[in-house]
Image (tube, rainbow, N blue to C red):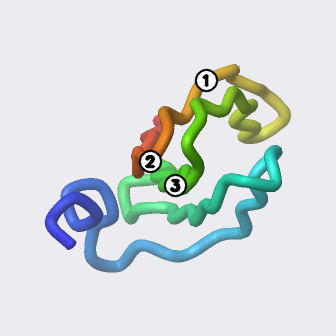
Amino acid sequence: MGHFSKFIHPGAKRIVSAPSRDFLLSTAYVNPDGKIAVVVMNKTDKDIEYYLWIKGKAAKTTSPAHSIATLVVE
């Protein structure tokens, strides 16, 4: 819980998110300061490359095996 509260602040609004890979789970929030926090979980035994798309722009990244990561976009 501490990991999430570090990036998702009180008053944050959940927004639509859809992972570009079937094996990933994700959720996303807009914080009151306008920053977007995206939480990505990889439950597989392999690292998975994927694209994070926000407002028509993409960033290629990798989710390590058995990981939960939060990406913050300003």
The residue that mark 1 highlights is 61
Q: Position of residue 59 (x, y in %)?
A: 68, 22
Secondary structure of the residue carrying tag 2 is loop
Which sits in the foreground, 1 or 57? 1
> Within 10 angstroms of label 3, few (less than 14), some, or many (20 or more) residues?
some
11 horizontally vs 71: left or right: left
Question: Going by the picture, which residue comes out furthest to the top?
Answer: 60
Residues marked 2 and 3 touching at CB (< 8 Å):
no
Q: Earlier in the sequence, mark 2 or mark 1?
A: 1
Which sits in the foreground, 67 or 31? 67
60 horizontally vs 5: left or right: right
Q: Earlier in the sequence, mark 1 or mark 3?
A: 3
Residue drawn at 41 percent across, 73 percent down: 12
Of the residues shown, which amino acid type is indicated by label 2? His
Of the residues shown, which amino acid type is indicated by label 3? Met
The disc at residue 38 is none
User: Where does the N terminus fall, quadrant-wise?
Assistant: bottom left
Of the residues shown, which amino acid type is indicated by label 1? Thr
Which sits in the foreground, 20 or 31? 20
Quarter of the rendering containing residue 22: bottom right
The disc at residue 41 is 3
Task: Kindly report which numbered mark, 2 or 1, lies closer to the viewer in this rendering.
Answer: 2
Give how far apart the Cα atoms at labels 1 and 3 are: 13 Å
Is residue 39 placed above or below 74 in the rendered structure? Answer: below
Secondary structure of the residue carrying tag 1 is strand
Is residue 26 placed above or below 72 in the rendered structure? Answer: below
Is residue 5 placed above or below 65 in the rendered structure? Answer: below
Q: Position of residue 33 (x, y in %)?
A: 37, 54
Q: Earlier in the sequence, mark 2 or mark 3?
A: 3
Secondary structure of the residue carrying tag 3 is strand
The residue that mark 2 highlights is 66
